[in-house]
Image (cartoon, rainbow, N blue to C red):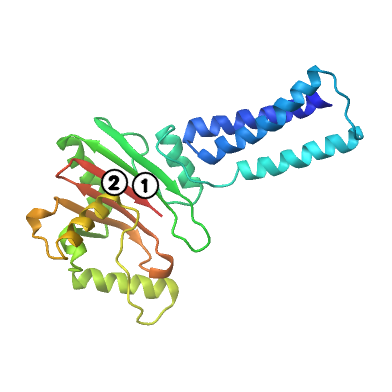
């Protein structure tokens, strides 16, 4: 009977470890450690031929009940970091409900993945998946062209930080917001969250009291692929291109 518990939790530990290796979900590594903390003492007790104090039926029931709880938590959606296989991480995020159709489905040729993560949605919090690549000028231009072709809105970092969004974009956002949520004349939120590139430029903007010259900001372009423009449950999918530092960042919500 002890060997039965060792096998069950050994399989769960291996499964969680595999998920951690493949997509970098730290919570699955934690689940793996829990399984090992259960399996190892049972293995030691099995080798020492220690008898089970309770009935075998209760032992099996407790084992299966605990395994179901661990298995349920192991299948839940938790965040991941850069570690893991990029293509699998993109598919995982897509299956979890985050928009990844505008992401490269594999690491582009002549590009390097420098950052990636998934922040799960918690209650009313805005979850997101993001990936940032560094690449040469030619690759950056090709990736930017793909983003531009899909974009519904395009503007520079200076326009974004100064709120200098065209009336055409503003009216488009307002129409989408009111149609999606059946509001009347609610003001849209043209906002991009979870962008490290934009946050870095925003810091420069604040350091200059909101009045930096364009030359003090990096050459950054923002492409909004899709958005509901609703400030309370914002879901904006975007691509941010930093031409100064040859980086491109994909964000899906």
- 238 to the left or right of 56: left
Residue that appears at 67% across and 40% down: 71
Q: Residue furthest top?
A: 47
Residue at which label 2 appears:
249
Q: Is residue 139 above or below residue 206?
A: above
Where does residue 52 sit, x and y in percent of width and height?
88, 29
Tell me the crowding category of disc 1: few under 14, some 14 to 19, or many 20 or more residues within 10 angstroms, Cα based.
many
- 211 to the left or right of 6: left
* Residue 196 disc label: none
| Mark 2 vs 1, N-terminal side | 1
- In contact (CB < 8 Å): disc 2 and disc 1: yes
Where does residue 106 sit, x and y in percent of width and height?
36, 34
Q: Secondary structure at mark 2?
A: strand
Location of the C terminus (image quadrant): bottom left
User: How many numbered circles does the render carry?
Assistant: 2
Q: Nearer the viewer, residue 137 or 36?
A: 36
Where does residue 220 sit, x and y in percent of width and height?
18, 51
Q: Nearer the viewer, residue 43 or 63?
A: 43
Tell me the crowding category of disc 2: few under 14, some 14 to 19, or many 20 or more residues within 10 angstroms, Cα based.
many
Where does residue 147 sit, x and y in percent of width and height?
26, 49
Residue that appears at 16% across and 45% down: 243
Q: CA distance from mark 2 to mark 1?
A: 7 Å
Q: Secondary structure at mark 1?
A: strand
Q: Is residue 78 above or below residue 205?
A: above
- 74 to the left or right of 201: right
- 137 to the left or right of 92: left
Location of the N terminus (image quadrant): top right
Residue at which label 1 appears:
130
Residue that appears at 29% across and 46% down: 249
Residue that appears at 38% across and 75% down: 178
Q: Residue furthest bottom?
A: 184
In which quarter of the view is residue 244 placed?
Answer: top left
């Amino acid at each position: 009977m002890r060997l039965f518990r060792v096998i069950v939790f050994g399989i769960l530990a291996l499964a969680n470890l595999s998920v951690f290796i493949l997509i970098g979900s730290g919570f699955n590594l934690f689940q793996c450690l829990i399984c090992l903390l259960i399996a190892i003492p049972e293995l030691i007790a099995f080798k020492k031929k220690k008898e089970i104090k309770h009935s075998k039926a209760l032992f099996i029931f407790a084992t299966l009940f605990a395994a179901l709880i661990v298995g349920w938590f192991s299948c839940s959606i938790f965040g991941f970091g850069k570690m893991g296989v990029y293509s699998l991480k993109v598919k995982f995020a897509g299956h979890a409900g985050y928009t990844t159709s505008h992401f490269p489905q594999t690491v582009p040729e002549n590009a390097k993945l420098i950052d990636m993560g998934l922040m799960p949605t918690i209650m009313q919090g805005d979850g997101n998946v993001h990936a940032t690549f560094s690449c040469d000028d030619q690759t950056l231009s090709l990736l930017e062209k793909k983003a531009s072709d899909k974009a519904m809105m395009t503007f520079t970092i200076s326009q974004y930080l100064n709120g200098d969004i065209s009336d055409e974009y503003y009216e488009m956002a307002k129409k989408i917001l009111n149609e999606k949520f059946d509001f009347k004349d609610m003001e849209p939120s043209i906002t991009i969250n979870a962008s490290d590139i934009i946050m870095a430029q925003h810091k420069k903007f604040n350091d200059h009291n909101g009045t930096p010259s364009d030359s003090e900001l990096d050459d950054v372009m923002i492409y909004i692929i899709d958005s509901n423009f609703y400030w309370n449950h914002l879901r904006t999918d975007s691509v941010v291109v930093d031409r100064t530092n040859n980086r491109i960042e994909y964000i899906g919500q």
